Amino acid sequence: MTQNVIRATGRRKSSVAQVKMTPGQGKMTVNNRTCEDYFCRPTLVMMVKQPLELTSQLGKFDIWAKVEGGGVAGQAGALRLGISRALNLVEQELRPPLKSAGLLTRDPREKERKKYGQKKARKRFQFSKR
């Protein structure tokens, strides 16, 4: 990996994705497994490849990613943001289509903490008048 390596980080919920992108044939490796093998749902695979398809860069880069934390949907969102940021670093001309599709925006929604005296963050215990 001594050639042109682009590094980017993506986050979503409690997931973090570290992305390394190099010019290549289009291989995508996530935690030392193929993308289709790691994200078993086709919707998640489509979500991860969305920035590449939008910018017509699908077979031009090899992507190696390390994702951790959260669930598979959050990890797919983090990886999508990381790939979008890496593409933005490769070519500035790709920024407008990525920006208009909302792929460069970090989704700030996090899990709300549980409060004491309640079942969950907002759900309360059943009220009994008598």
Image (cartoon, rainbow, N blue to C red):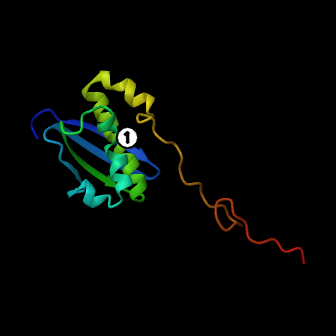
Q: Residue at x 64, y 64 (%)?
A: 120
Q: Which amino acid, mark 1? A: Leu
**From this viewpoint, which residue is outermost toward the bottom?**
130
Where does residue 78 sit, x and y in percent of width and height? Answer: 38, 47
Hey, which quadrant is residue 32 in on the image? bottom left
**Where residue 69 sits: x, y (%)?**
39, 57
Quarter the N terminus occupies: top left
**Residue 114, horizontal then vertical, whole percent:** 62, 61
Of residue 41 and residue 8, the one placed in the foreground of this image is 41
Seen as rendered, the residue at the extreme top is 93
- Residue closest to the far left: 2
Residue at image mark 1 = 81
Q: Position of residue 87 (x, y in %)?
A: 28, 32
Q: Nearer the viewer, residue 34 or 118?
A: 34
Residue nearest the viewer, comparing 40 with 33: 40
User: How many numbered marks does the figure carry?
Assistant: 1
Residue at 51 percent of width and 42 percent of height: 108
Residue occupying image coordinates x 89% and y 73%: 129
Instruction: Return the residue found at the far right.
Output: 130
Residue 10 in the image: above or below residue 3: below
Residue 22 lies, with reference to residue 31, above or below; the image says: above
Secondary structure beneath label 1? helix
Quarter containing the C terminus: bottom right
